Amino acid sequence: DTAVSQTPKYLVTQMGNDKSIKCEQNLGHDTMYWYKQDSKKFLKIMFSYNNKELIINETVPNRFSPKSPDKAHLNLHINSLELGDSAVYFCASSQSRNIQYFGAGTRLSVL
Amino acid sequence: QKEVEQNSGPLSVPEGAIASLNCTYSDRGSQSFFWYRQYSGKSPELIMFIYSNGDKEDGRFTAQLNKASQYVSLLIRDSQPSDSATYLCAVPIYNLGGKLIFGQGTELSVKP
């Protein structure tokens, strides 16, 4: 069984659309994260939730809204997509702030 | 200075050689240090972590930590073409609430 799973793996959409990416972990971890990796491979944290509570909220446009229905799930909703949102988005989880385990990534292309 | 810095490379070594990857960090309060490997088109996977000054060995990998110099390195002995990947150094930054900050990664190419 995949420990951290994200869906979809690929997402191609038009500018202005709204899309969501889902993440689930079955490791029993209490902390989940969203990262963005740009074309230069730089991996930057966007959000982190601990037991459904938002603990890290980086300076990202408010078009990005995370939601954690329970500690095993962390979804990312993006409104009014822009060309600059094209990137690979990774979900990760950890127990407290220990080792983070990453999902396979969602490659978002905004046309 | 960036919180975590690595040489972006690419670093090219012949098969069988030792590859040496370096990382410096800005926060003297950092206590733990992680090395992730990322193959092209794949997700980062943890290969080493180190908490104490000195060396930590795991198979062909050795992590070296020098807190006084704020420097952590990863040595890969007997490099194989399958080691070709981007290696990411990651450090929780104490004065940012322990947030994990990744370096920009070093691209390693091992030539047969």
Image: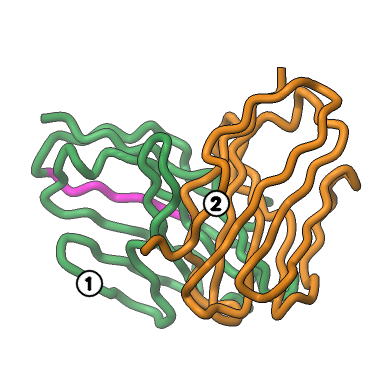
Chain colours: A orange, B green
Q: Residue furthest top?
A: A111
Q: On screen, B103 above or below B59?
A: above
Q: Chain of mark 1?
A: B
| C-alpha span from label 2 to label 1 | 32 Å
Which labelled disc corresponds to residue B49? none
Give the SS element for disc 1.
strand
Name the amino acid type tagged 1. Answer: Glu
Q: Nearer the viewer, residue A43 or A25?
A: A25
Q: Is residue A108 left or right of residue B111?
A: right
Q: Is residue A77 left or right of residue B24?
A: right
Residue ID at (78%, 61%)? A67
Q: Is residue B33 left or right of residue B82?
A: right
Residue B31 seen from this side: no
Residue range in magenta is B17-23
Q: Position of residue A61 (x, y in %)?
A: 87, 43
Name the amino acid type tagged 2. Answer: Gln
Which labelled disc corresponds to residue A6? 2
Which labelled disc corresponds to residue B57? 1
Q: Nearer the viewer, residue B87 or B17?
A: B87
Q: Position of residue B74 (x, y in %)?
A: 33, 58
Task: For marks 2 and 1, give the one nearer the viewer.
Answer: 2
Q: On screen, B29 above or below A111?
A: below
Q: Nearer the viewer, residue B5 or A87?
A: A87
